[in-house]
Image (cartoon, helix red, strand yellow):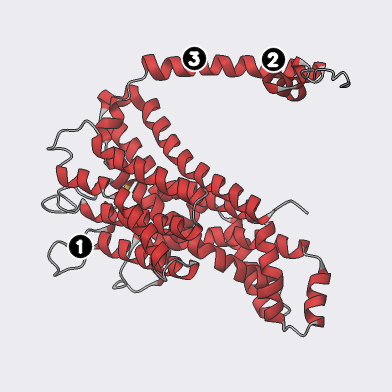
Amino acid sequence: MMANVRPMLRPPRFEAGVLGWAHANLFNSWHNSVLSVVVGAVLLLALWFGLRWAILTADWSVIATVGGRFVIGSYNSDQACAGNNCFWRPQVSLLMVTMLLGMGWGMAGGGVTKRIAIIVGVVIALFAFLPYSFERMGMDVRLLLLANVPAIGAGWALARYTRFGTVKWIVIFSVAAFLLTIILLRGIAGIPGLQPVAVQHWGGLTLNLILAVAGITLSLPIGIALALGRRSHLPVVKTLCVVFIEVFRGVPLITLLFMSQHLVPLALPQTFPRDSLLSAAVVITMFSAAYMAENIRGGLQALHPGQEEAARALGLSGWQTTLRISLPQVIRSVIPAIVGQFIGLFKDTSLVYIIGMVDITEIGRTFILGNPEFRISTKEVFIFIALAFWVFTYGMSYVSRKIEGHLGVGQR
């Protein structure tokens, strides 16, 4: 005779599913319930009025009117490039970026790298279908945009089926792609199709990205060197590092940019070539490196001294201990601070307007000032610019969280 089996009871309604999550996280006490209701009401009102304005009232046609100037500024104008045949240079640079993303996908085998590569390639390709006339966006421009999708596939195949699918080769290709981008955008005199384009015509989001990539790439190693120098037992090295860090941290970036343009040339010969892009890149890098040094130094001070003592007991030298034991642990622990510094650096590139450079923010401002009929659309312009910055900064934050989870940052 079989024993009577009682039927399994379903869990209480307020302990499972959406209701269970809401009860546990939003309404688990009276004060939490009040706060949830108030915050929810504020969010609903903000969404109601915000979406109502964005959909029914806002005039987004101004974004289409500015168009590609948000991306490359006046780079392809008659003043910068006679014949308007320089449009392909930034697009070729973009193809190199998507190809590098494809190589990262091929090396990693999937995950977040795959998602980023596919999203970037597809979104860029979709711009080829913007409802512009062929006089404004020709077929050659559209084909170069569509080529970003096969460029990702080519990068994936290159990393998957050749010996170039390693971190070392991807870093080498990345540096080469950045230098080639600078050469393409600058041009070379005497070579057909590569007529020089003055730096003052570089602009838009391209300018922000060039300055950010240069600053991020260089500020990390310089910051590490400054942090190690500040902890050095050599008085001269320590003093120089302390002075450098405190000077650059104690002066606003906008002041340093102004000084680089108007005061530094006073100490140089009049025949010395002046390059506002180089000046801005150097100042932004040095400014960020000073803050990066303090982030790294904080991580070094938090490292348990037993790590260094154990390394010395094993016979490792001072440099071996620093490079193989201390720095890997320090960089892993301060990834959130490092990425936060990188995000701040990217946003600070919008300050280069002070030295006459026209980034994406300055393009929006000058367009509104120069076209009074669009002043009613000022909000739309700057909301679009803010959204463009948010996409890149959120992408950096998202990648940072994935790296932290992979490395187990904050976990024991």
**Identity, as a three-letter code, of the amino acid under mark 1:** Pro
Can residue 409 be seen in the rendering of this structure? yes
Does residue 317 sit above or below 121 in this rendering? below
Give the residue furthest to the front. 1
Mark 2 is on which residue type? Val
Snapshot quadrant of residue 16: top right
Which is nearer the eye, 400 or 205? 400
Residue 384 - label: none
> Residue 37 got which mark?
2
Q: Quadrant of the N terminus?
A: top right
Q: Which residue is mark 1?
A: 196
Looking at the rendering, in which quadrant would you find the C terminus?
bottom right
**Image point 34% across, 54% down: which residue?**
153
Give the quarter of the image for residue 7: top right
Q: CA distance from mark 1 to mark 2?
A: 60 Å
Judging by the rendered image, the residue that carries numbered circle 3 is: 49
Q: CA distance from mark 3 to mark 1?
A: 49 Å
Q: Is residue 124 above or below residue 80?
A: above
Q: Earlier in the sequence, mark 1 or mark 2?
A: 2
User: What amino acid is at disc 3?
Assistant: Phe
Residue found 28% across the figure and 73% down from its top: 271
The residue located at (32%, 25%) in the rendering is: 60
Is residue 303 positioned above or below 134 on the image?
below
Apparent side of residue 3 relative to residue 132 in the rendered image (left or right): right
How far is disc 2 from disc 3 in space, using C-alphas? Answer: 18 Å
Q: Is residue 250 left or right of residue 272?
A: right
Q: Residues within 10 Å of mark 3 (few under 14, many from 20)?
A: few
Q: Secondary structure at mark 3?
A: helix
Q: Position of residue 192 (x, y in %)?
A: 12, 65
Whether pointer 1 and pointer 2 mark residues with C-beta atoms closer than 8 Å, the reply is no
Q: Nearer the viewer, residue 285 or 141?
A: 141
